[in-house]
């Protein structure tokens, strides 16, 4: 499935689903007609536009909420990646500067060796003799490498973490929606009866239903769902 037209380089939204032989194409109105004119195969076309079966006002409200989420997430994503880029550039500059220091250190060793047949030792100076061997030079390099790069701040990031955070934010909208729907109703029993009452606190309407339970319920027994896995129970005799 594609939300964009299958026609090459077209970024219009899909409005027609066209079955052509064993292939399925998604076209905007303009390119669906172009395809039909150019292709001699038998086609079966279907509109992706469907009528809705619930409150139009509610749909408009929800779509606006999704749009607001998209706008807010876009701004947050830009800010997050600006910070990532800043950290990345800062880390790049520090590491590059460290490599330049090592490069300069190597050139200094080569210059000294070419000039007087000797090489400088800074960190191993107290532990080696006046003549250094290859193992001494390796040890010197390891120490200087660790010393220079220890001044760099370690930093890393994973773009997958950013994607998961966006997905979590998106799914949270539906969790909040479910919570709102569950908080909408107050459930109670009529005193000393088995009659269950579901009261809509938004519309001030209720539904009564007799429940097949062993005992009559107590005084002012009521239940309200607080979240997806929490309920509040008030009153009643247990």
Image (cartoon, rainbow, N blue to C red):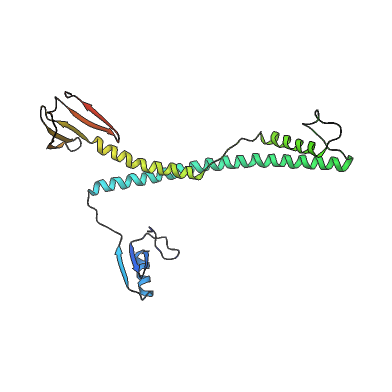
10 in relation to 39, above or below: above
Image quarter of the C terminus: top left
> Residue pushed farthest front?
214
> Where residue 22 appears, x then y in whole percent?
36, 68
105 in relation to 128, above or below: below
> Where residue 149 appears, x then y in whole percent?
67, 36
> Where residue 135 appears, x then y in whole percent?
79, 38
Identify the residue at image location x=39%, y=59%: 4
237 lies left or right of 35: left
- Quadrant of the rendered structure where residue 92 is? top right
Front-lying residue, 58 or 40: 40
Front-lying residue, 10 or 113: 113
> Residue pushed farthest right?
116
Identify the residue at image location x=17%, y=27%: 221
Front-lying residue, 151 or 202: 151
Identify the residue at image location x=68%, y=40%: 97
């Amino acid at each position: 499935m594609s939300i964009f037209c299958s026609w090459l380089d077209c970024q219009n939204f899909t409005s027609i689903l066209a079955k052509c032989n064993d292939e399925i194409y998604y076209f905007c109105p303009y390119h669906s007609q172009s395809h039909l004119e150019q292709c001699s195969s038998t086609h079966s076309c279907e509109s992706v536009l469907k009528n809705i079966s619930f409150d139009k006002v509610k749909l408009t409200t929800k779509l606006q909420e999704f749009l607001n989420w998209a706008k807010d997430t876009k701004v947050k994503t830009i800010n997050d990646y600006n910070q990532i880029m800043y950290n990345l550039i800062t880390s790049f500059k520090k590491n590059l500067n460290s490599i330049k220091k090592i490069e300069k250190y190597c050139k200094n060793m080569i210059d000294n060796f070419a000039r007087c047949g000797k090489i400088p030792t800074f960190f191993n100076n107290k532990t080696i003799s006046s003549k250094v061997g290859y193992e001494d030079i390796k040890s010197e390099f390891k120490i200087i490498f660790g010393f220079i790069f220890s001044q760099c701040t370690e930093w890393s990031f994973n773009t997958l973490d950013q994607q998961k955070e966006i997905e979590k934010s998106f799914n949270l909208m539906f969790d909040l929606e479910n919570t709102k729907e569950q908080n909408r109703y107050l459930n109670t029993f009529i005193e000393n009866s088995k009659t269950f009452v579901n009261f809509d606190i938004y519309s001030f309407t209720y539904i009564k239903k007799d429940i097949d339970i062993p005992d009559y319920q107590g005084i002012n027994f009521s239940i309200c769902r607080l979240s997806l896995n929490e309920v509040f129970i008030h009153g009643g005799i247990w």
